[in-house]
Amino acid sequence: MKRDYDLIMEVSRRKNLHFRLALIHAEVGRERVRRSLREGKVVPLGPAPPLQEEDLDNTVRIVGQMGVEPLTGALEAGADVVVAGRAYDPSVFAAPHMGKILECGAIAAIPGSGSDCLMGCLGEEYFEVWPLNPVRCCTVTSVAAHTLYEKTNPLLLPGPGGYLDLKEAKFTQVSENRVRVTGSKFIPSDRYTVKLEGVKKAGYRTVSIAGCRDPVMVREIDRVTGLVKERTRDNFAAAGYEYTLDFKLYGINGVMGKLEPEQAPHPRELGVVIEAVAQTQEVADTICSFARSTMLHCSYPGRIATAGNLAFPFSPSDFRGGEVYRFSVYHLMEVDDPFELFPMEMIDV
Amino acid sequence: MRYIKITDLASVIRSKNAGPYELTLDIIFNSKESFELARRSGMFKHELFAKLYGIDIENVIGVVEFEPANAIKATIKRPVVSGALGETDVYGSQQHAPLLGLEVPVGN
């Protein structure tokens, strides 16, 4: 947000532009969340676990997803330009169902594209959407299908301050490339809630990328990764490092991990990503490097090639991935009004 | 009993995160008829998705039919929270392959 603000200031200085700019902040302080948590006003969203105060202690940043009110509020206060922090994606369109379709641009058209826009027109009891690019069409299926996108249940779509009920939504083709939608309803909730998203630091990452073509090594890969983990554990037992060592095995289950249902035959080539995450970057480097050299030279049953078990595409072979974060807050917080968490500054540029 | 490949009935089969804790699977059929055929087969139940992904049935959060899009959608709990250690697909967009082998039973 700061970067965007700086960019706008730079451009307006250069072009000698003058306007009123609203800055709407979306970061929520830990203590603010803690207060609501103690009042029982913070509940998990979906399968997220209940929030604990310890989670908050370790959380480095929390944002709230603003609804439409802070944005329309800024316009009503005379803003010409609004720079806002985290917002519910459809909020910028001030029309929940239409906004949900427009926010991904021409993805709701055929052929779909994320780099093209859609036009939306809001009427009393309906809205219409259509693409501006003549090669695309909005069809009943393309628009209705987008309602499914990235959502758990397309019939009830929760958002800030209420939910969208699409049980009676009708999609009609009104011209070759234009679709009209009627019957979608926004049902305000009794209590206004805002979605919070927060992260805590999981450590620092270093990875090494390699390939493997030896059929015996490919066959024995599970044994090899087990052995490398064990050697690494033994070697650093006295150092007391806290780390995670993981192997992504492309060609086996590198993409689906635990969800992979197929026991396919062994691949001809195997892609290996060795991943170490530790409390400091130096420890992550050390773990990754030890695991990589152990994997390169370790012995396994039936080994016939003794000069090295891995093919490295790059030298140096290891890469720092930097800081790693994970979700610690994914919860709904009840607020007194939609503006409460989103303070606005008005600046005359 | 005759079977039709899902790829002959559907125009879109895809997976994606629905928030960091859930993975959602969309099957969008190529016509009203194909959708009705799939719906009538009664095969799109929690059990099917649990079996396809080797997960407990409690981790299938829901299966929904969405008539305006001729679509059936299932949502499962992610095995790890998006981006957590052990992640293989941060956005969940390559978890659909097990659906591609489905076959829908139709009457004789």
Image (spheres, grey):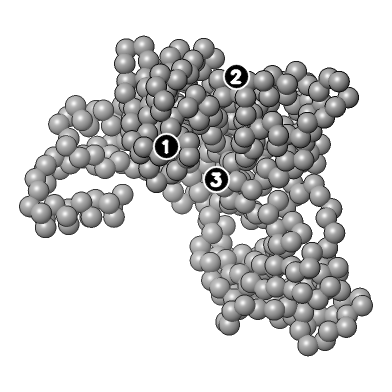
Cα distance between the residues tagged 3 and 1: 41 Å
Residue nearest the observer in this picture, A305 or B21 = A305
Element marked by disc 3: strand
Q: Residue at x 65, y 78 (%)?
A: A312
Q: Residue at x 52, y 41 (%)?
A: A329
Mark number for residue A328?
A: 3
- The residue indicated by pointer 2 is B67
Q: Is residue A272 left or right of residue A298?
A: left
Q: Amino acid at mark 3?
A: Ser
Marks 3,1: beta carbons within 8 A = no
Subunit bearing disc 1: A
Q: Is residue A274 left or right of residue A213?
A: left
Q: Is residue A210 left or right of residue A139?
A: right
Q: Farthest residue to the right: give it.
A: A302
- The residue indicated by pointer 1 is A136
Q: Taking A307 as reference, is B68 above or below it?
A: above
Q: Amino acid at mark 1?
A: Arg
Q: Which marked residue is nearer to the observer: mark 2 or mark 3?
A: 2
Q: Choose top left, top right, bottom left or bottom right for residue A43.
A: top right
Cα distance between the residues tagged 2 and 3: 36 Å
Alpha-carbon neighbours of circle 3 within 10 Å: few (<14), some, or many (≥20)? many
For the residues beneath circles 3 and 1, the answer to whether they share a chain is yes
Q: Residue at x 23, y 55 (%)?
A: A7
Residue A29, given in percent of the width and then of the height, sits at 39, 42
Subunit bearing disc 2: B
